[in-house]
Image (tube, rainbow, N blue to C red):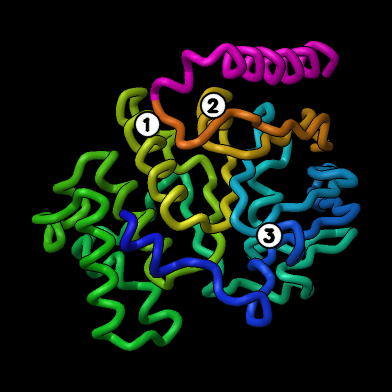
Amino acid sequence: MAAVLSDISAPPAATLRPAAPTPAAVGPTFHVSHLSKTYQTREGPVRALDDISLDIPQGGFVAIVGASGCGKSTLLKILAGLEAASEGTVLRDGRELSGPSREVGIAFQEHVLFPWLTVLQNVMLPAQLYGLPKEEGLQRARSLTAMAGLGGFEHRKPQDLSGGMKQRAALCRALLADPQVLLLDEPFGALDALTREELSLELLRLWEETRKTALLITHDINEAVMLSDTVVVMSPRPGRIVETITIDLPRPRGPHTELHPRFRELTHHIRGLIFARRSQA
């Protein structure tokens, strides 16, 4: 250890360089200002989101919770460039959104794997979509599937996989192009409780290794507090931000985190906000 430390000793004062900027210093990955979304239906306009303003910092993990139908997934789709806002602005890295990007990986509640393709072929789809070199994409796909515990299943079809394995494959596909941003729309919502907890902890480990900017949509308050730096609580439709809560729990986190008194305080507070709004709706 002493030898290693000697290799990284401080250079002379004349050659000192400023430290790398923190996420706050370089600006947020997403800056959302007064965003609203209205759908036109046969019965008339439906306001899904109303006056949303939110910053998602670079390298941060933000979770959004709220009742079903409050516009959480709509907001994610807008940030992904899959839908347009009716009002307001959305900037990614200081530039206005112009559509989907290889810099943004998305995983949905449904794995959306093509049943006629193998696991490896499904994971490789972004390489074709974005024109990545085939060998580079193949090497990365194999590395990701091994990391996700899918080694030995690369040439199996989705029908041969459990629900948890399918979601692992979907996450690998979202990560193939090495995006800077992960948008996660209830990726574990359809899984049983034990598998969901296992994959949540796996996602936590992955994020702590890569520190990609992450946005998670979830109904699970414990999951939101366990994974994120910030939890955004939304009201019933039209979705508005009720409160933005800093999750001041130490990292790294794991199953022991749920025993922390502050964990219980945070989950209780968030649950109170959501159910109070439901009773008023």
Q: Amino acid at mark 2?
A: Asp
- The answer to whether mark 2 and mark 1 are in CB contact below 8 A is yes
Report which quarter residue 273 is drawn in: top right
**Residue in front for this viewpoint, 223 or 7:** 7
Image point 65% across, 13% down: which residue? 265
The part of the chain drawn in magenta is 255-281
Lower position in the chain sequence, tag 2 or tag 1: 1
Report whether 171 appears left or right of 47.
Answer: left
Q: Is 99 in the magenta?
A: no
Q: Give the image location of residue 214, x and y in percent.
A: 57, 52
Q: The C terminus lies in which quarter of the figure? A: top right
The image's mark for residue 220 is 2
**Residue in front for this viewpoint, 100 or 3:** 3
Could you give the CA–CA distance between mark 2 and mark 1, rounded to whole angstroms?
10 Å
Report whether 189 appears left or right of 261.
Answer: left
Could you give the CA–CA distance between mark 3 and mark 2, rounded to whole angstroms?
30 Å
Question: Mark 3 — residue?
Answer: 22
Report whether 86 appears left or right of 201.
Answer: right
